Image (tube, helix red, strand yellow):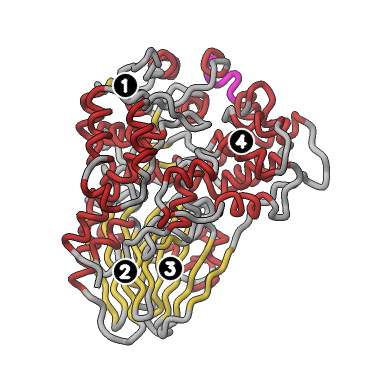
Amino acid sequence: MCGICGELRFDYSAPDMDALRRMTARLARRGPDHEGFFTDGSLAFGHRRLAIIDLSAHADQPMLDKALHLALVFNGTIYNYKELRAELVEMGYNFFSEGDSEVILKAYHAWGENCVQRFYGMFAFAIYDLRAKSLFLARDRLGIKPLYYALDGARLRFASTLQALLAGGGVDTSIDAIALHHHFTLHSVVPAPRTLLQGVKKLPPAHTMTFSASGEVALHRYWTLNATRPDQALSEQDWLVATRNVLHRAVERHRLASDVPVGVLLSGGLDSSLLVGLLADHVDELNTFSIGFEEVAGELADEFEYSDLVAKHFNTKHHKFAVPNAEVLKHLPDAIAQMSEPMPSYDVTAFYLLGQKVAPEVKVVLAGQGADEVFGGYFWYPRMDAATGTPQERFAQHYSDRDHAEYLAMVTEKCAVPDVTSAWVSEQLQQPGADEFLDQVLRMDVTNLMVDDPVKRVDNMTMAWGLEARVPFLDHELVELAAKMPPSLKLKEGGKFPLKAVARGVIPDAVIDRPKGYFPVPALKYIRGEFLEKMRAILNSQACQSRGIYRREYVEKLLTEPEAHLTRIQGSKLWHLALLEWWLQINVDGAMQDHPKT
């Protein structure tokens, strides 16, 4: 797990090494264990390492294979690297390290761009061919690892974070109006390749991109998620047995690919508790971690009742952190500085504060993210299923943060666009390879929406502390199995029925049968006191007014009644507006002062 960056010039001049060093320095928190650089003609790589597998210097990056004339920078983990290594050794390859990074190099040499189809894992990497002078970029199937880039006629720059690109300078930071519409409609999701900034794009999940020396680009999608029933019908018991077997394999893969101890982020819900149950017999002393907050407006802000129960049941070494609201407000600016894109979900800040507490104890944790999207756990799925109208209408009336009319009332004329989000959702839902409406929705969620909400928040907020978070419920083998299941099976008994069935006899029934919980930070939902004054100061600041995104009457309406305006999935509209402006001030305005656009 690391931070990567690089520059490839298309005019055959040398890369800007001062810019690359600034980019690499901006990634230091993602990789505190080692810094490295590599240059070859028009190409330069930078790397910050978090040592997890093969802790020796042999696995430092950038990694150069002199025999194969290939160089690599890699962020992530290949969980089946040992099996692939054995296969490559049989093919005659010799290895100089013991980790997964070198396996990627050899696999690329052996199988070309198809190597990505052989990988079980989370990854974003770049491989430079020193002879062909070509650059190969790849991102994992579910987009667990990020890869941002800035491309113009003279050069390509890429990095693990948007902030690293800004540190390099020369980026067009004007707002992409289409991305802005997505951001405020899809719960802050901006589908790849767009970001909120015109000059920054992101490689879509399950894609590779190859650049020739002269700048010719080839984009290739190597995986799609099939959401149709298998040719031979399976019984409910068949599905449950298959779920149990695949989940066990996934957890084992995520546990074993590490040369350091692995802990669990234990919320007290079904998903994280099940991970603890599946790991407990295989780890001598399992570290578990829980966090909670002060309640506001009578809303409970911790799940310690259940996390304590699970920790006691499995006799884990449990760490429990109660965070006062004053600490939340104090750490918000730094949490926002670590967001590659603005993320208003309440638990983003929770993950940031939890990462701060966990990192001194372990370097790797498993987390339950993705289970709700993969197995249909959220309350809005059955409501969509029961709704009427077009597929896009059924989805929007239970998910979209704002209707198009409200969006136009919120933004100024310069940001107004047609209803591009409804058009995008309609296009996604109509893609072939999904049997039922809910198959369409869950596939879109898993392959698009989830990538830029829960998945991105876990990466950003844990890596801010040099902590690797792994998400076994997003093992692509498990995701593929779940996509083929009938939606009615997933929604049975309130959702996530297959996981509940697997959990019986593994974890306490009280955790399985409890109401669905969330990861709340009530101070960001019920905005009062110091939090309200901070939001008011941000939205009334000269920077916000000069930026000219929001209509002032809309801002005043939210400031007057901050708790009266919530999205369909119960997010604060005021926090959403304030967060975007705060993010721009911290990450974009500050970077432009240091490195103006050239």
Q: Say what amino acid the circle numbered 4 marks.
A: Gln
Residue located beneath label 4 in the image: 397
Q: Earlier in the sequence, mark 2 or mark 4?
A: 2
Total numbered circles: 4
Q: CA distance from mark 2 to mark 1?
A: 40 Å
Q: Earlier in the sequence, mark 2 or mark 3?
A: 2
Q: Nearer the viewer, mark 3 or mark 1?
A: 1
Q: CA distance from mark 1 to mark 4?
A: 31 Å
Q: Secondary structure at mark 1?
A: strand
Q: CA distance from mark 2 to mark 3?
A: 17 Å
Q: Secondary structure at mark 4?
A: helix
Q: Is residue 218 left or right of residue 341?
A: right
Q: In the rendered image, which quarter is residue 556 located in?
A: top left
Mark 1: few/some/many CA within 10 Å (<14, 14-19, 20+) = many
260 or 526, nearer to the observer:
526
Looking at the image, the residue that sits furthest to the front is: 553
Residue located beneath label 2 in the image: 6
Residue located beneath label 1 in the image: 293
Q: Is residue 377 above or below residue 411?
A: above
Q: Nearer the viewer, mark 2 or mark 3?
A: 2
Mark 2: few/some/many CA within 10 Å (<14, 14-19, 20+) = many
Q: Say what amino acid the circle numbered 1 marks.
A: Phe
Mark 3: few/some/many CA within 10 Å (<14, 14-19, 20+) = many
Residue numbers of the magenta segment: 503-508
Residue located beneath label 3 in the image: 105
